[in-house]
Image: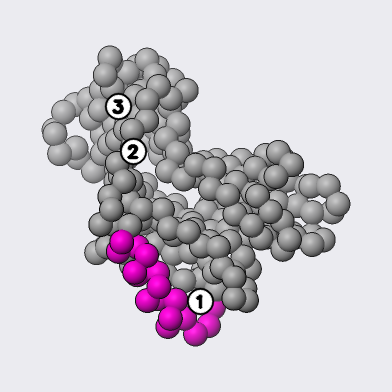
Amino acid sequence: MRNRVSCTWRKSTLRLAVVGAAAALGVLAHPAAATAAVDNSRTLPLEGGRAIEVQQADTSIQMYPPLDSSPLSVEFFADGATSVRITGYDAAQARGTKLTVGYQIGYPVALPGAVAHVITPGLGIGGGNSADLGVELIPDLAVGFDLGTGNNWNASIIPEQELEVELEPGGITEVPIVEDHTFDGDTATVRFAGIHGSVSGALGPVTIRPYAKAVTSTNDVVITYGAPHRL
């Protein structure tokens, strides 16, 4: 579905992300009670009485006039949160679950050279079963992640990234912003604000739909799709 993906990793952002996470961890006193507005979810029963749920919440996709003023361009900013939760017997011992979060971009026709361009802030992702931690990595780009219980926490930092995906001649192109992130434990959450995206070279209306997918270590797959947003 994708022809080409090029990513630019920014070292300065990685440094800020790691320093910010370490500082915030030092002042964490109690779990935060963040309230999320659930937009969509899907639950899949697993063997042994377990179940896995993928949930999207606080989704916001806003269109803005494109800076290049081209009638073939659209520009948007996006916020949101995605969570994976495994329940049932011995759920906290789950290992090797993979999480993918991204957007599907639909359009009637794309001209040769048409691309989707997405810039994400640094993303903090964690697994485990306890505290929610908000971290501001760079001005106006706040993200958060969950910390595991006890002394072991498997949060990892994804630096700011720049993705450019060639559009198919017509139809739907997927743009993953987190792809196959592997975590251990019964929960993982990614929150993001300030994702900047643009689509150039598409004829006709452009529609964006957020999606999230979890794959267990035994290859059970559950996917949830958000509401489409016409740009």
> Earlier along the polypeptide chain: callout 2 or callout 1?
2
Q: Which residue is under mark 1?
A: 32
Residue 172, visible in the rendered structure: yes
Q: Secondary structure at mark 1?
A: loop
Distance in Å between CA atoms under marks 2 and 3: 14 Å
Badge 2 element: strand
**From the viewer's perspective, is 87 left or right of 149?**
right
In front of the other: 4 or 65: 4
Image position of 230 with respect to 98: above or below: above
Q: Tell me, yes or no, if residue 62 can be seen here.
A: no
Q: Residue at x 28, y 22 (%)?
A: 114
Q: Earlier in the sequence, mark 2 or mark 3?
A: 2
Which residue lies at the image location 33% right of the left edge and 33% below the top edge? 6
Magenta-drawn segment: 15-33
Dividing the picture into quarters, in which one does residue 22 lie? bottom left
Q: Which residue is mark 3?
A: 115
